[in-house]
């Protein structure tokens, strides 16, 4: 199973909005509404920030939102803050018992 | 809460067993997965233990790694045989929910395969 495609890096100024894309195929992203997103700060374990495409776990800021169109899922971070600087990964079911992560995106806050 | 243990420095070809101690839920009938992250690289699924004995393995570890649960200890273990340099990574265990997202993660354990 090939990794989902994400941009290597995205940057934005504090207060701005950025969007990270996650592109797969009709066999993974496009086939199921179970895309999740994870935030990972250096040296830390990943943290769930979005599940089932657009749902937020309790305690996660509403500045994080998710969506999906066709074979591409997206994570939008609005009102960018310094603490949002991290790596972000998408993940989805890929059939046959497998899950697949995206290639990861490094977010830089200018 | 999930806590991994067992990471170590081993030589190529050797074996290692990782353990994921779970508290707060019963591993019997729950999905628990292992994810690894090589130094400076992204996240990669290694194995997922579903209900019963059904399990998924990444192609890169199929035939070498085996995942299992110990109900008496409430742990999920990953037996890793014939280790290779490319298996060097931080290994995380995570609770996989029914809609295939990881709600909880352990802190990770480092496996280094080097001669």
Image (spheres, coloured by chain):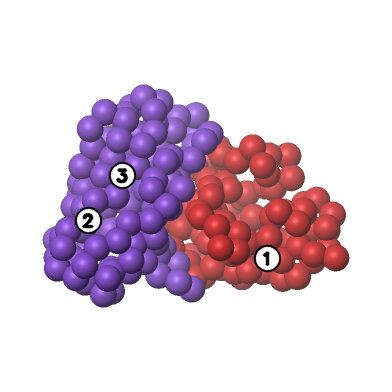
The picture places residue A51, in percent across and down from the top left corner, at 28, 49
User: Which residue is rendered at x = 26% and y = 28% of the image?
Assistant: A70
- The chain containing the residue under callout 3 comes to A
Residue under label 1 = B111
Quadrant (top left/top right/bottom left/bottom right) for the C terminus of chain A: bottom left
User: Which residue is rendered at x = 73% and y = 39% of the image?
Assistant: B63
User: Which residue is rendered at x = 30% and y = 35% of the image?
Assistant: A72
Marks 1 and 2, how far apart in space? 35 Å
- The chain containing the residue under callout 1 comes to B
Rendered hue of chain A is: purple
Question: Which mark is drawn over residue A18?
Answer: 2
Tell me, yes or no, whether the two marked residues, 3 and 1, touch with CB atoms within 8 Å.
no
Chain identifier for the red-coloured part of the image: B
User: Which residue is rendered at x = 36% and y = 37% of the image?
Assistant: A23
Q: Nearer the viewer, residue B102 or A36?
A: A36
- Residue A96 visible in the snapshot: yes
- Residue A51 visible in the snapshot: no
Marks 2 and 3, how far apart in space? 10 Å
């Amino acid at each position: 199973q090939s990794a989902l495609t994400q941009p290597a890096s995205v940057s934005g100024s504090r207060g701005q909005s950025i969007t990270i894309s996650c592109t797969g195929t009709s066999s993974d992203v496009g086939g199921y509404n179970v895309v999740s997103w994870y935030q990972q700060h250096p040296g830390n374990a990943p943290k769930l920030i979005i599940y089932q495409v657009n749902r937020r776990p309790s305690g996660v800021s509403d500045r994080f939102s998710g969506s999906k169109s066709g074979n591409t899922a997206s994570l939008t971070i609005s009102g960018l803050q310094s603490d949002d600087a991290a790596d972000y990964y998408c993940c989805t079911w890929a059939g046959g018992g497998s899950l697949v992560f995206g290639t990861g995106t490094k977010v830089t806050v200018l | 809460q999930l806590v991994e243990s067992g990471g170590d420095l081993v030589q190529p070809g050797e074996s290692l067993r990782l353990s994921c101690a779970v508290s707060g839920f019963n591993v019997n009938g729950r999905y628990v997965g292992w994810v690894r992250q090589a130094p400076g690289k992204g996240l990669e699924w290694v194995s997922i233990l579903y209900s019963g004995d059904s399990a998924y393995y990444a192609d890169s570890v199929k035939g070498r790694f085996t995942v299992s649960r110990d109900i008496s200890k409430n742990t999920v273990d990953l037996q890793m045989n014939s280790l290779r340099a490319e298996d060097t990574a931080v290994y995380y265990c995570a609770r996989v929910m029914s809609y295939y997202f990881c709600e909880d993660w352990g802190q990770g354990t480092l496996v280094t395969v080097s001669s």
